[in-house]
Image (tube, grey):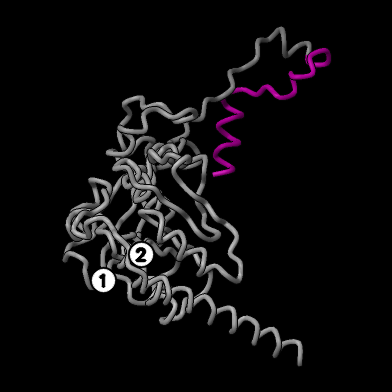
């Protein structure tokens, strides 16, 4: 019991120290880029976002899809932004090049320690876009201070996680549906993936949901062909058909008389039947 109390006291003290660091950093004058300038967003999502992009100093939550997060990172990097991912996310370094992401310009900090707020503050101070993948619910106090720091520094803060994880964000981009292309009944290969994106938040543009291919075509054009990608054979989107194919039963032809006469020598002769026998067995099984 005493050890548990001490452990809680230590965690509370560490949180207080981190919040103090955030407060001190927010009070220091810092020259930022023009807040009216927005980082680039995928062309397919620009009509959902204020100013048609990721406005500096705002917070944009990406909910429900790692592909959506990769799209935001890839589009921002194409405009020259330096980015970071803090926390254990589902970011796949192998899939990143498909979204035109340059891993040389991406800082990845997968392990969160007790001082993760200090690390987040340092990344917000020095980079253009910071992704925060913090497991568990973030308190309104911590979220508010990090959002305020990003606003002063001109950094775009991108929290990821389930809906409602980060209170007070400006815009929420949430994936609410998926469509897969190329799969039939028991056959086919995945040739395409679309996501249904909805927007909400106090600074979101009023708009209906939109279906966006993943990776977005605007980033695919920049990334170019990737090794191991399924080639585009010009097949229709709904190929293969989703219905189960009709099977045609071909009866076994009658064995020649010479073969049936030597049934004792031919091991397969016992499996050969006439068309009449086949029809009779089929009628009994129907």
Q: Is residue 166 visible?
A: yes
Q: CA distance from mark 1 to mark 2?
A: 9 Å
Q: Are marks 1 and 2 in contact (CB under 8 Å)?
A: yes
Residue 11: horizontal and vertical position, in percent? 62, 81
- Where is 22 relative to 251, above or below? below
Q: Which residues are magenta?
A: 263-286
Residue 114: horizontal and vertical position, in percent? 60, 71
Residue 135: horizontal and vertical position, in percent? 53, 69
> For residue 51, what is the image quadrant?
bottom left
Q: Nearer the viewer, residue 76 or 233?
A: 76
The reply, left or right, for residue 236 in relation to residue 145 is left
The reply, left or right, for residue 43 in relation to residue 222 is left
Q: Which mark is residue 75?
A: none
Circle 1: element type: loop
Q: Nearer the viewer, residue 270 or 75?
A: 75
The residue at the point 41 percent across, 37 percent down is 98
The residue at the point 52 percent across, 25 percent down is 250
In the image, residue 56 lies in the stretch drawn in magenta:
no
Residue that badge 2 annotates: 61
Q: Which mark is residue 201?
A: 1
The reply, left or right, for residue 261 in relation to residue 72 is right
Q: Nearer the viewer, residue 7 or 127?
A: 127
Label 2 crowd bin: few (<14), some (14–19), many (20+), radius 10 Å: many
**Farthest residue, direction right:** 264
- Where is 231 relative to 137, above or below? above
Q: Is residue 176 visible?
A: no
The residue at the point 65 percent across, 86 percent down is 8
State the quadrant of the C terminus: top right
Circle 2: element type: strand
């Amino acid at each position: 019991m005493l050890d548990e109390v001490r452990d809680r006291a230590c965690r509370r003290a560490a949180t207080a120290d981190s919040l103090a660091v955030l407060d001190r950093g927010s009070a220091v004058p810092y020259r930022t880029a023009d807040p009216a300038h927005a980082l680039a967003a995928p062309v397919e999502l620009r009509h959902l976002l204020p100013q048609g992009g990721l406005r500096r100093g705002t917070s944009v939550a990406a909910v429900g899809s790692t592909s959506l997060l990769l799209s935001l990172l890839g589009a921002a990097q194409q405009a020259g932004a330096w980015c970071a991912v803090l926390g254990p996310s589902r970011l796949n370094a192998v899939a990143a090049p498909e979204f035109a992401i340059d891993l040389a310009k991406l800082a990845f900090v997968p392990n969160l320690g007790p001082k993760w707020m200090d690390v987040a503050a340092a990344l917000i101070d020095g980079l253009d876009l910071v992704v925060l993948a913090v497991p568990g619910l973030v308190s309104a106090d911590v979220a508010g201070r990090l959002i305020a720091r990003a606003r002063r520094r001109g950094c775009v803060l991108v929290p990821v996680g389930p809906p409602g994880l980060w209170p007070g964000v400006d815009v929420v981009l949430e994936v609410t549906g998926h469509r897969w292309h190329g799969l039939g009944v028991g056959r086919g290969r995945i040739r395409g993936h679309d996501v249904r994106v909805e927007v909400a938040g106090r600074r979101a543009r009023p708009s209906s949901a939109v279906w966006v291919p993943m990776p977005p075509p605007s980033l695919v054009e920049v990334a170019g062909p990737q090794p191991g990608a399924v080639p585009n054979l010009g097949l229709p989107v709904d190929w293969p058909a989703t219905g189960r194919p009709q099977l045609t039963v071909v009866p076994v032809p009658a064995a020649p008389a010479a073969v049936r006469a030597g049934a004792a020598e031919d091991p397969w002769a016992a499996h050969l039947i006439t068309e009449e026998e086949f029809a009779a067995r089929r009628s009994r099984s129907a």
